[in-house]
Amino acid sequence: MKFLIDHTTMQIHRTPYAGDACGLNTTPLEKREGSHDEKYVNKLVEEKQYKKCSHCYDEKIYPS
Ligand SMILES: [Zn+2]
């Protein structure tokens, strides 16, 4: 799983599920970070109050 971190809105996206609803097209490229490191992503969520994107993490559409 690859993650896409939006440092402008402080949201974590899951790259395969990221779409128009995420609003990523308004985020400058230099403010987006791609990562395969789930530990790093979870650390951002736990320590920096980043939020998991409700679209990319919709369990009804994309069961984990
Ligand atoms: Zn998203």
Image (cartoon, rainbow, N blue to C red):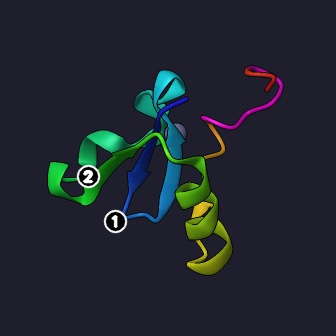
In the picture provided, is 54 more to the left or to the right than 36? right
Residue at point 60% right, 35% down? 56
* Image quarter of the N terminus: top right
In the depicted structure, whether residue 48 falls above or below residue 13: below
Magenta residues: mostly which secondary structure? loop
Residue 6 in which image quadrant: bottom left
Residue at point 49% right, 22% down? 16
In the depicted structure, whether residue 8 falls above or below residue 48: above
Residue 19: within the magenta? no
In the depicted structure, whether residue 1 falls above or below residue 27: above
Q: Is there a contact, CB below 8 Å, between mark 1 and mark 2?
A: yes
Residue at the disc numbered 1: 8
Residue 31 image offset from top left, x and y in percent: 24, 59
Residue at point 53% right, 59% down? 40
Q: Give the alpha-carbon distance from disc 1 to disc 2, as whole Å.
A: 7 Å
The kind of residue tagged 2 is Thr
Residue at the disc numbered 2: 27
Q: Which residues are magenta?
A: 56-61
Given residues 49 and 35, the one toward you in this image is 35
Residue 5 image offset from top left, x and y in percent: 42, 52
Residue 61 in which image quadrant: top right
In the depicted structure, whether residue 57 falls above or below residue 33: above
Mark 1 crowd level (few <14, some 14–19, many ≥20, 10 Å Cα):
few
Residue 50 image offset from top left, x and y in percent: 56, 67
Q: Does ligand 1 reach within 8 Å of label 2's beta carbon?
A: no
Find numbered disc 2 in the image and state the secondary structure of the residue it sits on.
Answer: loop
In the picture provided, is 35 more to the left or to the right than 12? left
Residue at point 83% right, 24% down? 60
